[in-house]
Image (cartoon, helix red, strand yellow):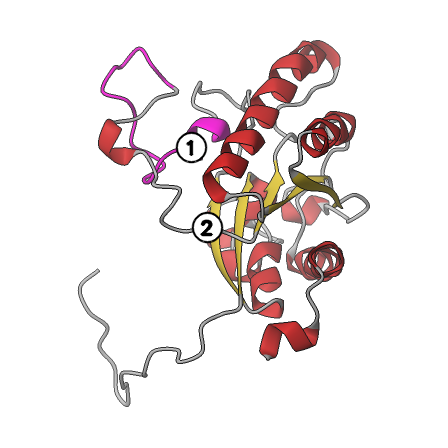
């Protein structure tokens, strides 16, 4: 980035009122807004994170947000190749910085490990499992998926503290990981971690949007997510703006 040049431009003052909440998102193409502009060939031009459901959730909840989302990636297995998975990416400051050891696809450099104490969210929203599959020949991945997912939640809970609430989602593209997600929630709750099922099922994934949620569905998902998060967190319109 160098500069922006244009007529009538001026520097605006920084936001005086800090945003009331912090939310972290971890996901795949569903979270990234892949192909949500629809009616065109899949490409970066067909994707708008500004129109994605996480962005809309943050706007509606007046939240400062961090998002880690990479299309095609899974918790333990990607849809379309590659050995680095989202449970690896979550630990990194720069997602694409690999390990110094070329034989280690899961690691990264020591200086690229994210400092989890530098930004602590009130809520963590995770939707990973569509690319893992977990049906047919991939059903054998369920134990690894469960263990890796639960370890990630436990590690995040230790790093962020007991006040952070986890929302573990399933849907809308596939429902094959819903039961494993519910199992992980049960295990997390049993050791005192606040975890809630976030229902993303039932939203259309049109063929014209590469069988992903389009901008219209992103708006619907955002409205549903806001209701579910507010109910679990006890947030209200008044608590957001007071």
In the picture, residue 197 is in which quadrant?
A: top right
Residue 27 location in percent, x, y? 56, 40
- The residue to which callout 2 is attached is 120
Q: Are there few (<14), some (14-19), or many (20+) residues within 10 Å of tag 1?
A: many
The label shown at residue 78 is: none
* Residue 8 lies in quadrant: bottom left
Q: Residues within 10 Å of mark 2 (few under 14, many from 20)?
A: some
Quadrant in the rendering for residue 240: bottom right
- Work out whether mark 1 precedes mark 2 in sequence or the reverse, and give the earlier one: 1
Residue 47 seen in the current view: yes
In the rendered image, the vertical position of residue 118 relative to residue 137, given as above or below: below
Magenta part, dominant SS: loop
- Which residue has dot 1 on it? 89
Q: Nearer the viewer, residue 128 or 205?
A: 128
- Mark pair 1, 2: CA separation: 18 Å
Asked whether residue 204 is drawn in magenta, I would say no
Q: Is residue 83 above or below residue 194?
A: above
Quadrant into which the C terminus falls: bottom right
From where the camera sits, is residue 41 visible?
A: no
Q: Residue at point 39% right, 78% down? A: 15
Q: Residue 45, how many percent across, how many down?
A: 46, 53
First to last magenta residue range: 86-105
């Amino acid at each position: 980035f160098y500069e922006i040049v244009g007529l009538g431009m001026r520097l605006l003052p920084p936001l005086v009122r800090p945003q009331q909440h912090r939310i972290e998102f971890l996901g795949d193409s569903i979270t990234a807004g892949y192909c949500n502009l629809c009616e065109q060939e899949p490409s970066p031009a067909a994707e708008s994170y500004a129109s994605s459901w996480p962005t809309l959730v943050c706007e509606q909840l007046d939240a400062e947000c961090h998002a880690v989302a990479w299309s095609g990636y899974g918790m333990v297995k990607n849809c379309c190749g590659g050995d680095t998975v989202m449970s690896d990416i979550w630990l990194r400051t720069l997602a694409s910085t690999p390990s110094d050891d070329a034989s280690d696809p899961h690691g990264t450099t020591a200086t690229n490990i994210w400092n989890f104490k530098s930004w602590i969210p009130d809520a963590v929203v995770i939707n990973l499992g569509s690319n893992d599959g977990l049906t047919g020949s991939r059903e054998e991945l369920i134990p690894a998926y469960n263990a890796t997912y639960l370890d990630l939640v436990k590690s995040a809970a230790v790093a962020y503290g007991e006040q952070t609430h986890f929302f573990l989602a399933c849907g809308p593209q596939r429902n094959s990981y819903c039961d494993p997600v519910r199992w992980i929630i049960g295990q997390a709750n049993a050791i005192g971690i606040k975890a809630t099922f976030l229902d993303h099922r039932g939203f259309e994934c049109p063929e014209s949007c590469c069988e992903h949620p389009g901008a219209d569905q992103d708006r619907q998902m955002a409205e549903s997510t806001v209701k579910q998060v507010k109910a679990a967190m006890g947030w209200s319109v008044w608590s957001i703006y007071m």
